[in-house]
Amino acid sequence: MLRIILLTFCLLTAACTATVDISSDSLDNQKDLSPADVEDDVFLNTLEAIHDTNPLDLLPLSPIVWDTCSGVEGDHPCNLEGVDHRGDNFGLYANFGRPIVLDFSAGWCGPCRNAAPHAQEVQDLYRDSGLLYVTVLIETTNGSVPTQADVAAWAAEYGNTDSLVVAGSRSILESGGGAWPLTGWPTFFYIDEEMVLRDIDRGYNEHEVIYSIDWLLTL
């Protein structure tokens, strides 16, 4: 009788041990498929996808797609860059989408100085249109290449705030692979929102500038 009891106890003990082992295996399997591990896999796959993507592919396409430029009406003008009176870098092509007036002036030029006090007035007058009026100072009063201090002094003298004054040079007229055709002082270039050169005025006439801007904005 004792043997039967012992045998029964052994069988029950073995069954309990087996049940525990099976339960333990089941928990291990569940751990392998836990949500945390699944999330880690998704995260790693996402990282791989990001590294496989060229960051430049995520940027919008540049509207500057032409290969050539010129100072001829109807063509895309060449880019020009310089430091403005506030100390910021100015780039013509960076202002794609805005109508632009470029006023090429020199410090020794009397008509240029006659035009200068009206630059900010024009900027204010056409503010709602998005027009940008830029004076590009090619030379100072003594014919030297303007510095940022020179254009800052010009802006202070003539009240330029957001009508930009940019330091240029004779060499800037040949920059960008093309040319800006200056045959008189000042010379005004009227550029539309698609960065197309639409009109050129040589010499300064206040009424002519207003007329040309009005015409530019109706295109």
Image: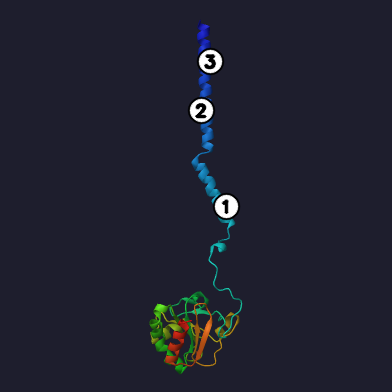
**What kind of residue is marked 2?**
Ser
Describe residue 130's horizontal placement relative to residue 64 as left or right: left
Q: Amino acid at mark 1?
A: Glu
Would residue 18 be seen by someone viewing this image from the given angle? yes
Residue at the spot 46% in from the left edge and 76% down from the top edge: 88
Q: Are marks 1 and 2 in contact (CB under 8 Å)?
A: no
Secondary structure of the residue carrying tag 1 is helix
Q: How many marks?
A: 3
Q: From this viewpoint, which residue is outermost toward the bottom? A: 110
Labels 2 and 3: the sequence-earlier one: 3
First in sequence, mark 1 or 3: give its number: 3
How crowded is the residue under tag 3: few (<14 C-alpha within 10 Å), some, or many (20+)? few
Q: Is residue 144 visible?
A: no
Residue marked by disc 1: 48
- Counting residues from the start of the chain, the first of labels 1 and 2 encountered is 2
Mark 2 element type: helix
